[in-house]
Amino acid sequence: MAGTEKDKTRPPRRSLADRIREPEERAIEIPAGAARARSRRDFLLFGAGALAAAGGLWWLLPDDTKQQHLTTALRERVDSLQARLGATPERREKFLDRALTFDDDVAEALYSPTRTVRTYSRAQTTPLRNNYNGRTPGPGYLPGWNLQLAGLASGKNERLSIGDLLARFPRRDQVTRLCCVEGWSAVAWWGGFGFADFLKAYPPAPEARWAKIDSAVNLDGSGNPDPYYVSIDLDTARHPQSLLATHFSGKPLPLEHGAPLRLVVPMKLGLKNIKAITSIEYTDEEPPDYWAERGYSRYDGL
Amino acid sequence: MSAPAAQAPRTAAAKTAGAVRKVVPKHHALVRLSHWLNVPILLALIASGLSIYWASPVFTHAPAAGSNSREYLSDIGIWVARHAPVLVGKGNPAAWVYDRFGIGIFHLAQALRLHWLFAYLFMANGLLYAIGLAAGGGYRALLPRGSDPADALRMMRYYAGVIPAKVLRRPWPHPPLRSKYNALQRGAYFSMPVLGLLAVASGWAMHKPAQLPWLERLFVNYNGARIVHFAVMVIFAAFIIPHVVLVIADGWDTFRSMITGWSERIGGGHGRN
């Protein structure tokens, strides 16, 4: 079109307003047979899609919820039909685990060792719930408490008292937010020493990529021993805001917040912030994690 | 509107080949696909989202006398139990909303896994929708325009009068429409993708507040993002009701146009009958 006489009098390009103006609707003609065939194809696809969506959603529901929505006989019929088509409960769990792993991979990709989380002033702290189902252990374990270390570069296992730790590492204060997987959050003032400093003082074996952190003194809701354990990748452990906390609100950690030593990793969900640590072991392979074994994420990056 | 004169020869040619149907293309195939995919995706997101919300509600109030409820969604169940006990049955009325509309009580881990799965599907589906709008040019019918406020008022007046006019057997013509949607439809259909973006943004703000702090700040704080996310869900749910009612009222042609992509209503927008 360019170069003709007419073009010189017209603007060479359509304006933005012209381009986004809604065109008038124009009827087109298609052979009736073709229209019927296309219509039939689209409705069949629609029906098949609706059936697949309903079946897929039903498959993904937890088993005891299914019980609520259909009678036993009908439920069993649907479930056995689905199982024959390959949609078994085992496959469901595997599929949902894969979705969780995908989300964990996204979280890990977003993580930056240099990005720090927001810090607050001490006046901005909010009440911190002790939301764990388990009971708070009694003070009985405190006098004999020490931190056991394994998987070190030295090849030796260490046993450190709280006095050793407080004397050796300078205390640092940090006001950060703890976000629970349930959705609540609280701003708390922590004091302790950097996990990174601790890793420098007691370097892990060179191949180690993980820390398995345990609390042997943890109790369940009925007060029975229920050891708690979390997996922490060493990248997170080395983050400048990862703290082995000894103090809460300026005072030594109270029992309900994990005396005498707990983990504070504000770039992870609250459930990784293990209380009353009794041992740390560095491992090459990803260690087990209490809540990951119960269907939650294993990375828990915020 | 009749077929333009330029198409007359083609019409004649087609007639000799057999019967033809005159149709107006309405929705691009990807727009139709993403529209219907939203149904199971939003259903799963709302159900799993309610179960997640239930683990730690934001909209709490002082314990109510008599029921001990501290939370507005529980109040709905208690209210229903009081007025329509058949619906609630023997279950705990305070948990009725979450038991019936969530994925079941005490399923936080399951709800989280479902929510992440469908959240990624929702984002992928949003992308499909955007591609479909761009490819089919459908976005041009959605963009707000200067005449919208006045047209919206006319449409409201029309809708308010439809039933009285039927009762009084008086003619009540639909305001003339030169575009695909009337101003009210355009407002609603333009808001949906905007709300979808808001749902995704507030979701990420809550999901990764440490890595995306700027996004969290956009919603003031963590709880701000939770409140926006919940409000968007309520608006989505509230949109569905008039959306479905109006499609039923408007008739088969409108419903079919979202499946086959075409309408046989030549020269008129929606809302003719």
Image: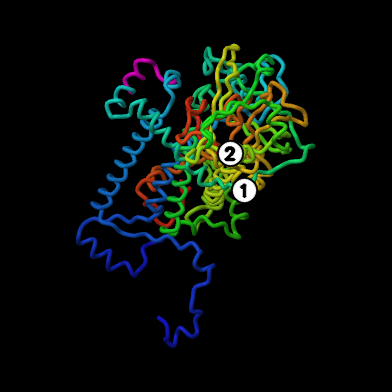
- Does B14 appear above or below A196? below
Q: From where the camera sits, is residue A132 visible?
A: yes
- In-front residue for pair A250/B261: A250
Identity of the residue drawn at 68% across and 25% down: A260
Instruction: Say whether residue A244 is left or right of residue A149.
Output: right
Q: Which region is colored magenta?
A: A69-78
Between the C-alphas of marks 2 and 1, the distance is 14 Å
Mark earlier in primary sequence (2, 1) = 1
How packed is label 1: few (under 14 Cα within 10 Å), some, or many (20 or more)?
Answer: some
- In-front residue for pair A220/B1: A220
Q: Secondary structure at mark 1?
A: loop
Q: Are marks 2 and 1 in contact (CB under 8 Å)?
A: no
Looking at the picture, how far across and down is residue B154, in whole percent? Answer: 59, 51
Query: Is residue A107 part of the magenta span, yes or no?
Result: no
Query: Is residue A72 part of the magenta span, yes or no?
Result: yes
Disc 1: which residue:
A115
Label 2 amino acid?
Answer: Ala
- Name the chain letter of the residue that bears numbered label 1: A
Main structural element of the magenta stretch: helix, strand or loop?
A: helix
- In-front residue for pair A159/A39: A159
Q: Secondary structure at mark 2?
A: helix
Disc 2: which residue:
A237
Looking at the picture, how far across and down is residue A71, in whole percent? Answer: 39, 16
- In-front residue for pair B169/A188: A188
Q: From where the camera sits, is residue B229 visible?
A: no
- Does A79 appear above or below B254? above
